[in-house]
Image: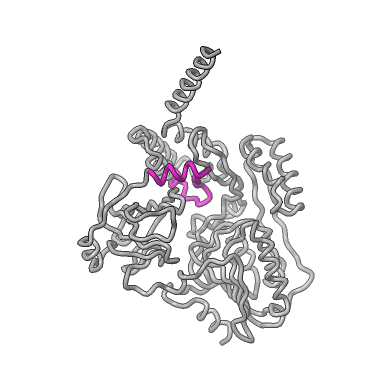
Amino acid sequence: MVRQILILFFLLIITNFSFAQSCDCRTELLFLKKQIETNYSGFKDKVKSSNRAQYDAISTEVLKQATQDTKSTYCLRLMNEWLSFFKDGHIYIGMADTVAINKLIRETEVISITPQNLTRLKISKNAEGVYYSSDSTYKIAIIKNKTSFRDYAGVILTSKSSFWKPGQVKMELKQTTKSAFKAYYYSKDHSIQVLNYSFDGKSLNNGDWTKEGIIAASANTQTFVPVQFKSLSDRTSYIRIGTFDEGNSKAIDSVFKANESSLKSKPNLILDLRGNGGGADFAFYPILPYLYTNPIYNIGTDVLATDDNIKSWLPILSNNNFPQSTKDAIKNNITKMQEHIGRYVSLSDDDTTKFEKIEPYPQKIVILIDNHCASTTEQLLLTALQSKKVTLMGQRTAGVLDHASVRSAPFPCSHFTLYYATTRSRRIDQGKGIDDTGGIKPNIVLPFDQNWITEATKYLEK
């Protein structure tokens, strides 16, 4: 009996050892590459004959580099570097559990910042300096620190988040022009995003990080709230919505119902959607009656029918945050996908939405937008632009909508999860895509150093 237990124990060791040996960064990258090529709805739009050689060269180089380091942080950076080719915010890698987060935290690079360095940074005229995040969670020092990936490192000085400690590298910047950088930004959970950052002499990424000694732009210092209503004057109401996540849909509906009398009696409304990265379309339905002035034309979407995509859609059917009507529609679409594997299947037809009446109030609506508005929020904006009541004010949106309906796939042997788009808008075929044009442009551009709520109120009440 003891001998049998020892043999079993030995076999478990051999099995786990073999798994660990095969679970390397190259294996993870090959899985990622196959998933994107097979299941990502935008692959054929992003990889064409004109850039296929470039795609193949980048893939070969990243796979080659995958053997140079065994750290999760290194592999995660390589995978995100490869994903950046697609320029799609609807493809990203997240942490599956706390095991992955803790591993990344342990492997995060640490750089010592001396008092002499800080003194020098305070008089620097270039990108070096001490910076505060827009929500004041982090204070970092950006210093010259060149590696194969970067020219500058952003090092934590102080942090209100328990996930980040002084000395840890929060971001890496690779200079591309005098005022532009490729940024490897590490999120709260230490996962990585590959972004394009600009430097205007005062801030990075349009005020996301403000240099010490500079007054932060009011447009980027908003405190996140899921949904909020305010009466700004006897003529203007204000509603801020931080997310259209399905879990916030009931709160949004409640706020609109609770303030129905004010909304239907005041001539003006400011709808503040800054920082709203999207969620589920049904979450913005309570807004539509107030925006509506004429029939709304909707361009439909197709879903890529693959076995993996079908599996990834199934969990929605048991998600209590989704209304039954949405679940019924998804169930029908899954049936169509099963009948047309390997093809694009219509998820929603082109149609026209008509309401029974036009609400007399509000008469004018300003929607505040910025470069963090994405996905479902952009879908709402395409609808709002068809209204005679609406004016968009602020900055261009993120441009993350043409390929949407994000689903997930766990990596085979790490604690990472791939998130990717499964649907494709037919706007692309009509030359109306927004992702490659830099997002949705506001009717009135507002600089970041102005108070946008004040400017919107002036515009509405003039």
Check the image and report above or below for 184 versus 29: below
Which of the two residues, 105 or 257, is positioned nearer the viewer here?
A: 105
Looking at the picture, the colour scheme in use is one colour
Q: Is residue 229 magenta?
A: no
Check the image and report above or below for 81 versus 181: above
On the picture, is 33 further left or further right than 260? left
Which of the two residues, 333 or 315, is positioned nearer the viewer here?
A: 315
On the picture, is 362 further left or further right than 438? right
Residue 3, position in %: x, y?
Answer: 51, 12
Number of residue marks: 0
Residue 418, position in %: x, y?
Answer: 52, 42
Q: Quadrant of the C terminus?
A: bottom right
Q: Quadrant of residue 53?
A: top left
Q: Residue at x 70, y 75 (%)?
A: 259
Check the image and report above or below for 145 versus 393: above
Residue 232, position in %: x, y?
Answer: 59, 82
Residue furthest to the right in view is 356
Which of the two residues, 203 or 379, is positioned nearer the viewer here?
A: 203
Residue 412, position in %: x, y?
Answer: 52, 33
Q: Residue at x 53, y 66 (%)?
A: 224
Q: Quadrant of residue 166?
A: bottom left
Q: Is residue 89 magenta?
A: yes
Q: Magenta span covers which residues?
A: 83-106
Q: Residue at x 50, y 59 (%)?
A: 398
Which of the two residues, 101 or 281, is positioned nearer the viewer here?
A: 101
Residue furthest to the front in view is 2
Q: Quadrant of the N terminus?
A: top right
On the picture, is 198 further left or further right than 233? left
